[in-house]
Image (cartoon, rainbow, N blue to C red):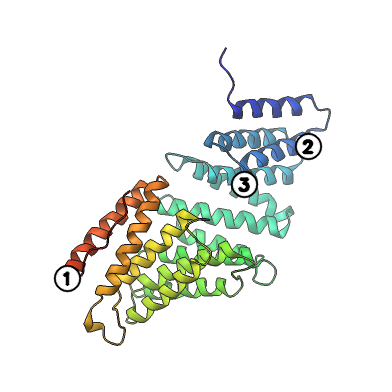
Amino acid sequence: MVALSRTEDQVRAALRVVGESDAPAAEKAEMLMEIAMGMQQKPQAPEDLHAAIELYRLGVEQAPSGQALLQARIRARMATAMMAAPAADTGLLEAARGELETALATLGAEGLDTEIAEAEMNLGLVLQTLAGAGRARIQDAISAYQRALRVFDKAGHPAEFAILQNNLATAFLSIPFTDETGRMREALAVQAFEEGLRVVNLVDHPREYAMLQNNLGNALQYASSSHRIENGFRALEAYDAALKVRTARDAPGEYANTIANRANCLANLPDDPAAPEAGNARNIAAALALYAEAREIFERTGEHGKAEAVGGAMAELQSAQASFGVPAVQEKDL
């Protein structure tokens, strides 16, 4: 007899409890949704998320046909599990899009304002990811974020407002730079990051604060501006602010991402902004040290693609460093 996996055991136990209950169908549907949410919130394996999706589906089927709002709420929650579940293609994301659009048709008429805004925000995320795969329009993602902002404003919902500003900014930056409107979108992105940072702070919203600072740094670093050096030093300040939250101990992956971004920025800035013609040998050495630390963390945490990319950047910098006659940085063993 083959032993049941932990996930299968949990699902069967949940179905048994619901099946044996004398509760009305609507209550059983809510029970299934609650069990699915519990599995989704603390998944120990990808199977947990797929099992949660199945329980949500059963919840939709269990909900009486006259309970459209309950069905919509379950569909909206199911979409978030679909968004989180790992998949080899866009199938689950496209299913999440369908569930959210179906849910919004009812939520828009009967749901709470916050439910509608949360569904719109999640729809924007799905559309933005699908747009990167050529399966949706990025403009539709931007529209969804903007609809969510009608409810998630800076006064009443600062954390959600900041996340939406971040998502809007990254959506603006993902549009191909084909003409002068690209510069306007870059400016809008920087403005959105800064707008988000006006409503969150290091103490009350540390994760959102660090995310916005890191992404603001990236936007400034890569902006096609005539103020490249000025923007670069502003980017360093943003990365340093993010690193007040993203530490090697508490958030190694995010820390490695930010120090790698900081390294790339440093490598392209002069040592003395007042004398850019003097070169940047000192900044290159500092960048190599940061790259080495980031690569070690990526290798240790299994992000081998990132480790390889950092290694390639290091090789290029080491060639540039040699041209200044500066001794190479001693790397740690990986």
Classed neighbour count for the residue bearing mark 1: other residues with Cα under 10 Å, few (<14), some (14–19), many (≥20): few
Mark 2 vs mark 1, CA separation in Å: 74 Å
Residue 262's tag is none
- Residue under label 2, please give it: 26
- Residue under label 1, please give it: 325
51 relative to 167, above or below: above
User: Quadrant where the N terminus lies?
Assistant: top right
Classed neighbour count for the residue bearing mark 3: other residues with Cα under 10 Å, few (<14), some (14–19), many (≥20): some
Mark 3 element type: helix
**Earlier-in-chain disc, 2 versus 1:** 2
Mark 3 vs mark 1, CA separation in Å: 63 Å
Q: Nearer the viewer, residue 56 or 200?
A: 200
Mark 2 element type: helix
Mark 2 vs mark 3, CA separation in Å: 19 Å
- Residue under label 3, please give it: 102
Residue 257's x, y, as percent? 42, 59
Which image quadrant is residue 115 in? Answer: bottom right
CB-based contact (under 8 Å), mark 2 and mark 1: no
Three-letter residue code for mark 1: Gly
Three-letter residue code for mark 3: Thr
**Earlier-in-chain disc, 2 versus 3:** 2
Q: Is residue 161 left or right of residue 188?
A: right
Residue 102's x, y, as percent? 62, 46
